[in-house]
Amino acid sequence: MTMNKKTIEDIDVSGKRVLVRCDFNVPLDADGNITDENRIVGAMPTIKYLVDKGAKVILCSHMGKPKGEPKKEFSLAPVAKRLSEKLGKEVVFAADDNVVGENARKAVAEMKDGDVVLLENTRFRAEETKNVETFSKELASLADIFVNDAFGTAHRAHCSTVGVASYLPAVCGYLIQKEIKFLGNAVNNPVRPLVAILGGSKVSSKISVIENLLDKVDTLIIGGGMAYTFMAAKGYEVGDSLLEADYIDYAKEMMAKAGSKLLLPIDTVVAREFSNDAESKIVGEGQIEKGWEGLDIGPKTVELFSDAIRKAKTVVWNGPMGVFEMPNFAKGTNAIAKVLAEIDATTVIGGGDSVAAVNQAGLGDKMTHISTGGGASLEFLEGKELPGIAALQDK
Ligand code: ADP
Ligand code: MG
């Protein structure tokens, strides 16, 4: 997918009521304080642009899983407060259990150009996740234009991401524009060589990604827990490592198809048990014994992978190389992150845990692009068209 969707810069927003679907799905602590405001920060460029252009900016988002009912602990009120502070102007919170109820209508009716209103959690309405017309129409009735900037939910066809786009001119905001540009170009129009690094726990959850990327990449690197199924496909013992026996044949097929494009680990850090303090050692290819499980790639593998990555002009990374949550088994993941940080190439990180790993290594700001949507970026790498993007107007 290349960038053929209209953006906020392609339409006249001045004086218009613009409904913006943001991703304000931020984590809260027990006292309702926002513990990570990255998603609010990510939404700012679009909001600021619209405010500066004199639009009437109506923001909406889901947060958590209130299961279609108003629940106080899932209220977006804390987001309105934080947004006001960041924007340096009041964001009126339309506290409305129905999301589009009397409060919301009144708040919108009173807006002047450049004002900002935030609606209540869209998932307070049961219709939202079922993409039911009634709620989509209610949302649309508040505005003249719809802007989708919630990449994190662009893979879901909900009222506030897809339904509403049937009733209003619909374009994307800066965040979605950026995601399409980096993820889309990296996969579909890359500066070559293109190297994809896949890892994480399961082959089964990444099959479509492997299939889509295999055709497109110059080199495919597979590490992490999913590598053991490939090792088993080579006929090796994998001990107590993660293994999806049902996917061994699939792994064989992929290996045959990929030929020399595919790089697999040539050594492994194995441990006695799944714990940071477990007894551990490094073993060579095919040397994992019973009673041991692989929890990280070994130093020779780091070298092998790094050499391939250093030749790349574009790198896409999804899935950690080991159990990065445990410091003793984060070394492989950290070493790969370091190579990505050093090279002169476009580096794109997608996937919730991969992003967490890169940030944990303190290298987030050294990457070209860190995707803001875990599930959405995965579907993008699978080559799927995301409904929340498909619903927007073409250029
Ligand atoms: P992402 O969220 O980036 O798409 P995944 O969810 O597919 O990544 O996988 C991340 C998880 O994989 C992490 O929790 C990590 O601990 C786990 N993992 C990686 N390597 C191994 C391994 N060798 N054994 C067990 N789990 C692993
Ligand atoms: Mg994950």
Image: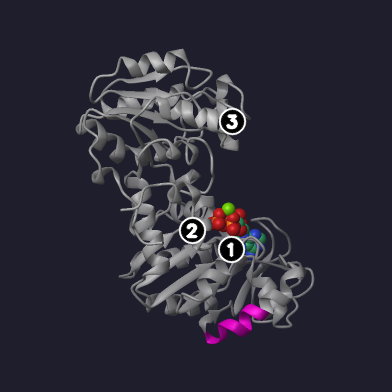
Choose between 14 and 42: the one closer to the eye: 14
CB at disc 3 and ligand 2 closer than 8 Å:
no
- Between marks 3 and 2, how big is the CA–CA gap? 26 Å
Marks 1 and 2 in Cβ contact (< 8 Å): no
Disc 2 on helix, strand or loop? helix
Characterize the magenta stretch by its predominant secondary structure: helix
Q: Amino acid at mark 2?
A: Phe
Q: Which residue is mark 1?
A: 322
Q: Nearer the viewer, residue 47 or 34?
A: 47
Magenta segment: 253-260
Which residue is disc 3 drawn over? 127
> Which residue is disc 2 drawn over?
380
Image position of 22 with respect to 174: above or below: above
How is the structure coloured here? one colour
* Residue 288 makes an appearance in the image: no
Q: Secondary structure at mark 1?
A: loop
Q: Nearer the viewer, mark 3 or mark 2?
A: 3
**Relative to 282, is 27 above or below?**
above
Mark positioned earlier in the residue sequence (1 or 2): 1
- From the image, which quarter does the N terminus lie in? bottom left
Q: Does mark 1's beta carbon lie closer than 8 Å to ligand 1?
A: yes
Q: Quick one: 279 or 341, which is closer to the camera?
A: 341
